[in-house]
C-alpha cells in the first residue's frame, strides 16, 4: 500500500448557485436538533445524515455551509464525512446495496451474494449503475455476525441471505426504484 498526497490546501470547492443549507434548514436545525446537544458540534452527525438523505451525498459546498452553521472548521466536517463509511462525497444511486464482508460473512459465503449483485446490476463494488438507480458497496462488519451473510438495502438490514432471498430482494428493489421518480 502506498500513500498518495492530495493538494487539499489548493482544492477548489465547486459552487452551486443553490445553497445546501437553506434558511429553512438552519431554522429547523436551530429549534429541533441543536437543543439536544450541549455544544453545536454535537449536532454534526444528524445534520450530515439529513443532508445526505436529501441529496444522496454530501458535496464539499455542503460541508463548508454546515461548518459555517455549526461554527466549526470545514476540515472537521470533512474529517467526519471521510471517516464513516455511511457518508458519501459522490452521489450514490437511489438504492444503495451494501454487502458485508466481515470474517463471519466471509465464512458464510458472502462472495456468492456479492457476485450475484455484481452480475445482476452489472457493476463492481463502489460503482453506480449508469442510470443512477443502484450503488453497490462492500462494507466492513454490519454488526449481525450471528445471522451472516447480511446486506443492507438502503437502511434495511437483510439477514441469513441466500441467492434466492437476494434475487427476491433485487427484484423488489428494481421494481421500487423503477416505479419512483
Image (cartoon, helix red, strand yellow):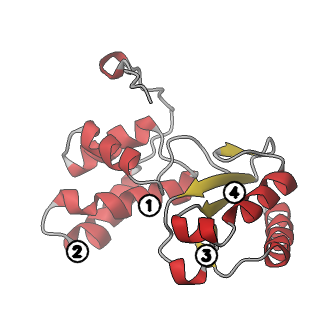
Left or right: where 173 falls relative to 90: right
> Label 1: which residue?
49
Q: Are marks 2 and 3 in contact (CB under 8 Å)?
A: no
Kindly report the distance in space between the C-alpha atoms of the residues bearing marks 4 and 3. 14 Å
User: At 53% from the left edge and 65% from the top edge, which residue is drawn?
Assistant: 103
In three-dimensional space, the C-alpha distance between marks 2 and 4, rounded to whole angstroms, equals 30 Å
Callout in the foreground (2, 1): 1
Q: Position of residue 49 (x, y in %)?
A: 44, 61
Residue at image position (76%, 63%) is: 112
Q: Quadrant of residue 150?
A: bottom right
Q: Residues within 10 Å of mark 3 (few under 14, many from 20)?
A: few
Tell me which numbered mark, 3 or 1, is placed earlier along the sequence.
1
First reached walking from the N terminus: tag 2 or tag 4 = 2
Depicted 38 relative to depicted 81: above or below: below
Residue drawn at the location 80% of the way across and 41% of the way down: 130
- Label 3 element class: strand
Quadrant occupied by the N terminus? top left
Quadrant holding the C terminus:
bottom right
Frontmost of labels 2 and 3 is 3
Q: CA distance from mark 2 to mark 1?
A: 16 Å
- Mark number for residue 36? 2
Q: In front: 15, or 7? A: 7
Please provide percent x and percent y for residue 106: 61, 65
First in sequence, mark 2 or 3: give its number.
2
Question: Distance between the Cα atoms at labels 4 and 1?
Answer: 15 Å
Q: Secondary structure at mark 1?
A: helix
Residue with the mark numbered 4: 94
Which of the two labelled residues, at mark 2 and mark 1, occupies the earlier sequence position? 2
Please say whether residue 151 is visible from this viewpoint. Answer: no
SS at circle 4: loop
Amino acid at each position: 500500500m502506498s500513500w498518495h498526497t492530495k493538494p487539499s490546501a489548493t482544492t477548489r470547492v465547486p459552487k452551486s448557485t443553490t445553497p445546501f443549507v437553506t434558511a429553512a434548514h438552519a431554522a429547523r436545525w436551530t429549534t429541533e436538533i441543536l437543543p439536544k446537544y450541549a455544544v453545536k458540534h454535537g449536532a454534526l452527525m444528524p445534520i450530515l445524515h439529513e443532508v445526505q438523505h436529501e441529496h444522496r451525498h454530501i458535496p464539499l459546498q455542503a460541508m463548508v455551509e454546515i461548518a459555517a452553521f455549526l461554527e466549526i472548521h470545514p476540515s472537521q466536517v470533512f474529517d467526519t464525512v471521510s471517516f464513516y463509511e455511511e457518508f458519501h462525497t459522490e452521489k450514490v444511486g437511489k438504492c444503495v446495496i451494501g454487502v458485508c464482508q466481515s470474517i463471519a460473512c466471509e465464512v458464510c459465503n458472502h462472495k456468492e451474494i456479492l457476485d450475484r449483485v455484481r452480475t445482476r446490476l452489472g457493476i463492481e463494488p463502489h460503482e453506480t449503475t449508469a442510470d443512477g438507480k443502484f450503488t453497490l458497496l462492500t462494507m466492513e462488519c454490519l454488526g449481525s455476525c450471528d445471522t451472516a451473510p447480511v446486506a443492507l438495502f438502503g437502511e434495511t438490514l437483510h439477514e441469513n441471505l441466500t441467492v434466492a432471498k437476494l434475487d427476491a430482494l433485487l427484484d423488489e428493489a428494481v421494481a421500487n426504484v423503477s416505479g419512483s421518480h
